[in-house]
Structures are given as structure tokens and as C-alpha cells.
Image: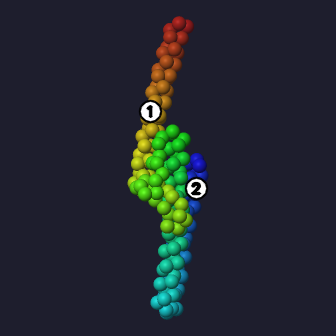
Amino acid sequence: MNLISYRWKLRKLHRSRAKTVEAYKRLQDNARKENKAQDELESLVHEEMFEIDMIDDDIESLESRFLIESARKLILPIPEFKTDGDAWVESRITGRYRLSKNAMTEVRTVVRKERKERREGMIMWLVALTGLVGALSGLLAVWKS
């Protein structure tokens, strides 16, 4: 999964979450205006909570998958899968495992550090290459004159 598709999917899930919240707010407001029974209002609230939990679960799973793939592309370690450890948590909705918030923070930190180190190495080579080109053009100018 590349960064563009990740961001697109994440934005789509966040929009879906916002639309769901707005839709249930309208339903609850209409139910209050029509003086519906308290049981119906509570039912709407529970339905909203369930749907929001499903979307939040999808968001967290997507974020976890993206971080794992990012770490693997950079050949970095990811936390060992253990059902009884702190690094992996089971989804209440799907039953699938994903990285916990703390583990995601640790993996994200390692990925950022590795990308920064690689970027700094490339910048050093670029600076050296620019200096070499400048020196060669200076020598060429002196030699021509």
C-alpha cells in the first residue's frame, strides 16, 4: 500500500465516520421532536455507537497495516506476534489482531528515524556531487581561458 492509497482510504473512512455521526444526530433529533419513547432513543444511540466502533476499527486496522508495511519495506523489525503481549490487540469487532497504540507509536518512531537517516545520507551524496560538479566547471573555465 503506497502513501497515496493509504491517505485516500483513511480520508474516506473519516468522511464515512463524520457522515454516520451526522446522520444519527438527525435521526435522534427527529425522534426527540416526535416524542419517541426513551427505548427508541437509546436504541438509536447504541446503533450509532456500534457503527462508529466498526469504522474506528477499520481506521485502526488500516493504520496498523500501513505501519507494518512501511517497516517491512525499510527492513525494520516489527513487534513479535503474541496474543498475550502488549504489542498486539484483538479487534472487538472483527476478531483480527492489529498493533496496539503503543506499538504503533514505537514502529512509527523507528520508521521515521530510518527514513531521516536515509534522507541525510542521500543529501550528503548530493552535496558532494554538487561540489564536484562546481569544482569541475571551475577547472574547465580556468583551462579554457
Identity of the residue drawn at 43% across and 35% down? 117
Identity of the residue drawn at 48% across and 80% down? 45
When the figure is inspected, residue 111 is found, relative to residue 42, above or below; the finding is above
When the figure is inspected, residue 70 is found, relative to residue 16, above or below; the finding is above
Q: Quadrant of residue 84?
A: bottom left
Residue 125 percent coordinates (x, y):
48, 25
Residue carrying label 2:
8
Identity of the residue drawn at 55% across and 65% down? 94
> Which mark sits nearer the N-terminus, 1 or 2?
2
Identity of the residue drawn at 46% across and 48% down? 80
Secondary structure beneath label 1: helix
Q: Amino acid at mark 2?
A: Trp
When the figure is inspected, residue 25 is found, relative to residue 40, above or below; the finding is above
Give whichever of 113, 136 is nearer the camera. 113
Give whichever of 83, 135 is nearer the camera. 83
* Residue 134 in sight: no
Secondary structure beneath label 2: helix
Question: How many other residues sit within 10 Å of disc 2, few (<14), some (14-19) or many (≥20)?
Answer: few
Q: Are marks 1 and 2 in contact (CB under 8 Å)?
A: no
Question: How many other residues sit within 10 Å of disc 1, few (<14), some (14-19) or many (≥20)?
Answer: few
**C-alpha gap between disc 1 and disc 2:** 28 Å
Q: How many marks?
A: 2
Give whichever of 4, 139 is nearer the camera. 4
Residue carrying label 1:
120
Residue 88's tag is none
Task: Name the colour scheme.
Answer: rainbow
Residue 44 percent coordinates (x, y):
51, 82
Give whichever of 141, 103 is nearer the camera. 103
Residue 116 percent coordinates (x, y):
44, 38
Q: Amino acid at mark 1?
A: Glu
* Residue 54 in sight: yes
Residue 20 percent coordinates (x, y):
54, 72
